[in-house]
Amino acid sequence: MSGSGRLALCAFAATLMAAGALLPLVQSAVWLLHAGIMLAVVGGLGALTRRVPLARPLTVALQGLAALLMLTVVFAPDQALLGIVPTPEVFAQFGRLLTEGGDDVGRYAIPAPATDGIRLMLIGGVLIIGLAVDAIAVTFRGAAPAGLPLLALYSVAAGLSGGAGGWLWFLLAAGGYLLLLLAEGRDRLSQWGRVFGGAPRAPGRFSSGSDASGGRAPVRTGRRIGVVALGVALVVPAALPALDGGLLAGTGAGNGSGVGGGGTISAVNPLVSLQDNLNQPEDREALRYRTNAPDTQNMYLRIMALDKFDGTSWRFSQRKVEDVPDRLPGSPGLGPGVSTTEIRTNISAAGWYRQNYLPMPYPATQVDIEGRWRFEPAGRTLVGDRGQSTRGARYEVASLLVNPTREQLAAAPPAPSSLRREYTEVPAILPDVVKATALDVTEGAANDYERAVRLQDWFALDGGFTYNTEVDSGTGVTAITRFLRNKEGFCVHFSFAMAAMARTLGIPARVAVGFTPGTQQPDGSMSVGLRDAHAWPELYFEGVGWTRFEPTPSRGSAPDYTREDVPSDGPSDVARPDTSASAAPSAEPSASDSCQAQAAQPGECGPVTPGAALPPTDSGFPLKTVAWIVLGGLAVVALPLLPLLWRTRIRARRLGSGGRSPADATARTLMAWREITDTAWDHGVPPDESRTPRKAAERIVRLGRLEGAAAEAVHRVAGSVEQVLYAPEPRPGTGLADDARRVREGLGASVGRWTRLRALLAPRSSVRVVWAASERWTSLTARWSPQRLSAATRAVTTRWRPSRQRG
């Protein structure tokens, strides 16, 4: 294969390898197959136009036109003339799809469904990057700058996916770039001829001209430098914590990233992704758990608490983290007189679910989990350190069911001044209507507890609010006032508005983010999906601690202590939880003896001990499936190129340098003659094995219309063949590989463009593969049953062999 062909093939491979980083963004990987086919067409067209040759800008323009035509056929055939010719309506359709794609990107969580808009953005983007790489590296012969579009493709993918796939996609993209550089370096070396590089190869081995021993030393050195540089890029950031935020930092798809060494954690607002989860077209399972809790309606899985409201959004404060203790410290504000029961929950996260904060019941007292996790005491959360995430995690959590009475909440003393000062802070720009509405709703309430219940019931029952996940998820003061006016929103608006209003009334408040309890499965486990994502307010009451409220209508469940007709349990000793609840987990849940047979369902008949949580049914990112799809796509693309690839390989072996013995010299001479014969056959001059080498040479020169150096090269090689076959002392010729190349160039110059194209892509001599397979099959069958030699096989062989009497 020529240097340009190698570069084009490497540019195609490098673009596809970098495009792999986009796979975690969407649920389906079929788009990559489509992009690969289109890239192959664009690259093939570039290779053909460069062989003509055409002007470089014209080559790029034709490739761009081909990409446009393919995008038109796939995405806008109804608007195109004859289904393929772009019209103004086609570009209008592209604009609509791109707009819809942008909306879908903002609407859906990763991995998003492969809508037409998203597919156009992905396939079109990969085509543009592929065209840029091909133009820079191959057409304009500058492989090094071609790394910039590849880096842009990987960076965009890594940024959108939050680093999902991390090192794997980086290795693929970097490997593709190194492949491109090596191909260009080898091509440049081959243009200077043979460079001394050490001892020759062992006798009997062949190589192409560019693979000669002289060029291997510089190429090997470049390869080693590239591998070392790639290794440094991967190892150094992992070895030095100060570089943890680099290109391969595991930022995750969650809401923040932790740092070790007793540092701090910070988080971005997670509510945009929460709305995306609620609007998913398919409720994808993220978690599955088993618990010995007597009732799962209060099993909210809390991820984090947003405790800072600056007027534009609610955020997670920057706080110190520490090592996870064997048993977590007591829950802030919880007194000994409140009824509590310790329960245990076994949780499994899906392989695709990547979250830096650990979902678990609140308040947790003990967590058993493998990996690099850190504990943040104020929010009682566990955060992953140095890229640690929940992906595929299995863990056990001991937590408390806190059951305060209405009387205990109503009689709660004021919170400590430091806590009130931090958690009742509201921005100066908060509109007066927020506090005025809070005062109006809670008018006549005797204490903070009654005010909190009235706020909850006003949002959930009495205020005329409507639950709607399509409403803009803004979190600032404008969004709150708009929500209070329009009375339409989802959990974000209800929790934020109630927390802000509670703060205006002097009640410490924050917003928790996580999941509602989920759906019970036939095997007794609970399944938590994306649509169970939720936000709720937590209000602080001294003696009870942070207490959950549920203002969102049709979501979750209102706590028992906010309803008048639900009795509360008596107090128990918080330091000595129920021993039956904290027993070691068993394999399956068991029902209480007093439970009736028809009601013997887990969670309905008192405490049961949880078994091991089964993995979620969603196994996560289908890496094996994607790999098979990509391999299948590459096979489909490569199938038409098999004759070209076989012919290139055979030519390299025939014209490569072998050993130096007389037998090796004879073999090289005969292979060079076979190469000239097959090259003539590819260009329309079939071989005639009945002729002597001299007569065959005259026939090739005459039918191939060869002149000058090409004709002399044919006769020279034919003379060398006669020498090694018939002379008493064979004298093999020299420069046979160069003569074979001259003949090939002469034959190409004497035929038309389409004949040259066929000789390249569908060489006639590739039928020798069929002959070889037929002969091997005949030999194989003859070993065990000579009488079963297939007449069909002989007929096929006879049919495909050219006549020995033609010309």
Image: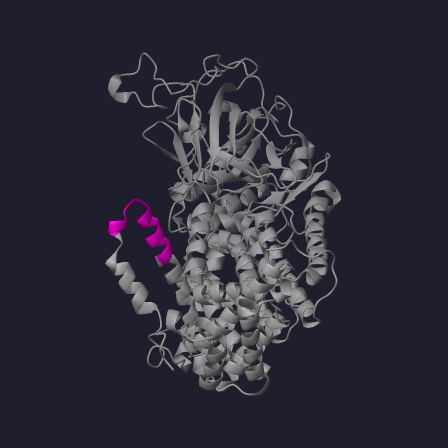
Identity of the residue drawn at 71% across and 45% down: 237
- Image coordinates for residue 172, horizontal then vertical, percent: 58, 53
Of 406 and 793, nearer the camera is: 793
Q: Which residue range is magenta in the image? A: 775-788
Q: Quadrant of residue 580?
A: top left
Q: Quadrant of residue 518?
A: top left
Total numbered labels placed on residues in the image:
0
Which quarter of the figure is the N terminus placed in?
bottom right
In screen coordinates, is 168 left or right of 274? right
- Image coordinates for residue 754, horizontal then vertical, percent: 43, 81
Of 14 and 778, nearer the camera is: 778
Is residue 785 one of those drawn in magenta?
Answer: yes
Is residue 272 one of those drawn in magenta?
Answer: no
Of 784 and 152, nearer the camera is: 784
Name the dominant secondary structure of the magenta segment. Answer: helix
- Residue 471 in view, yes or no: no
Which quarter of the figure is the C terminus placed in?
bottom left
- Residue 402 in view, yes or no: yes
Q: Is residue 34 above or below residue 676?
A: above
Of 548 and 351, nearer the camera is: 351
- Image coordinates for residue 610, horizontal then vertical, percent: 43, 22
- Image coordinates for residue 430, horizontal then vertical, percent: 60, 52
In screen coordinates, is 412 left or right of 352? right
Q: Is residue 118 above or below residue 467?
A: below
